[in-house]
Amino acid sequence: MDALTATGLKKIQVASFVNPRMVPAMADAAELFGAIQKKSGVRHTALWLNAKGIEKAAATAGVDLDGKMMLYASEAFSWSNNGCSAKDQQQRQLEWLAIYDRLNLPLEAVYVATAFGCQMQGEVPLQAVLDIVDFVRDLCAEQSRPLPSIFLGDTVGWGNPEEIKRRVNAVRERAPGMRVGLHLHDTRGMGAANFYAALQEGVDLFDSSIGGLGGCPFCNHANMQAAGNICTEDMVQLCHELGIETGIDLDRLIGASRLAEEIIGRTLAGKVMHSDSLDAQRAALRQAQAGEPA
């Protein structure tokens, strides 16, 4: 976490406040937050799936709270991930909002999980996503809240570039005041293509993970190690090659990825972490051509 904090990233989701019996790896989330070296301008946030998780995060030193809602386009995934129907999950968000109000916390983002398809249910109709957009838009109007950003989640890796474009633009048409972001997974190797398609549509909000780590323990993949989010350093590399400034030190980010791989003890899915950045390669070539020592 300290290595990531030094890369230029402005927002890092550190851990989840979830049931430790269901997700044992997150049992020491509070301890981890307490050990992070804080840096001005960098937010260290957390994930939660229910009101109890919000309260735990709020009571933990070092957590930078960000108000968010979690909704599901797939009924089957809602039951698997939260133990309730998608409609019941919508109603639970009212409790979340009440807690945010008590904490003086604005609603920043809404996440729509399984917005492109579901490992359990199959195809997810676009209308299911638009119904959620309507729910959020109407709720914010009713409660006089500014519209939050909305993140469409390819939670289980069913998206493709054309569908990314189609759904991003459909949401924009439905709610022009909402900034659209994407939470992409690289489950089937489509992550970079989907990321690039979104960039072409002007999307500039993305979730990603160091070394391509991540994934969901409840999505029923045959190989859970293949179910990670798009890789942060690979996406930064692509942005830099396209001339898109990120404010991120890619070489430091690669170093953090290699450290993560060492800590975890297995080869991670990231590509550039195993080959160096192109800028580093270019610098080495220039040095060699000039006859300078490496």
Image (tube, helix red, strand yellow):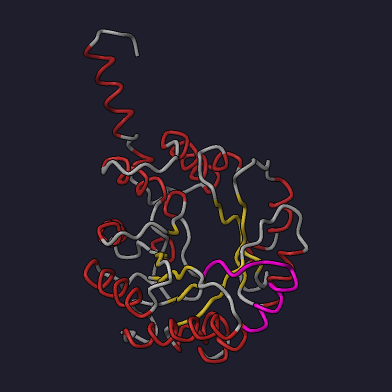
- Is the residue 79 above or below the residue 6 in the image? below
Residue 187 coordinates in the image, percent (x, y):
35, 65
Q: Say which residue appears at 63% left-offset and 84% top-offset.
A: 94
Is 37 left, or right, of 219 in this rendering? Answer: right
Residue 82 drawn above or below residue 36: below
User: Can you say which quadrant of the picture contains the C terminus?
Assistant: top left
Taking the spot 67% from the left edge, 82% from the top edge, the residue there is: 95
Between 139 and 97, the residue placed more toward the observer is: 139
Rendered location of residue 58, percent (x, y):
74, 64
In terms of image quadrants, where is residue 208?
A: bottom left
Along the line of sight, which residue is nearer the eye, 69 or 257?
69
* Viewer-proximal residue among 80 and 195: 195
Report the side of 64 relative to 61 (left or right): left
Q: How many labels does the image show?
A: 0
Q: Nearer the viewer, residue 195 or 30?
A: 195
Q: In this view, does 99 lie to the left or right of 270?
A: right
Does the magenta-highlighted stretch encompass residue 107?
A: yes
Instruction: Please give the name of the residue rendered at 45% of the width and 76% of the height, measured from the top-left corner.
Output: 112
Q: What residue range appears in magenta?
A: 94-109
Residue 1 location, quadrant = top right
Relative to 56, residue 207 above or below: above
Q: Is residue 4 magenta?
A: no
Please tell me in which quadrant of the rendered image residue 84 appears: bottom right
Q: Position of residue 155 (x, y in %)?
A: 41, 71
Q: Residue at x 53, y 49 (%)?
A: 264
The answer to whether residue 76 is above or below residue 229 is below
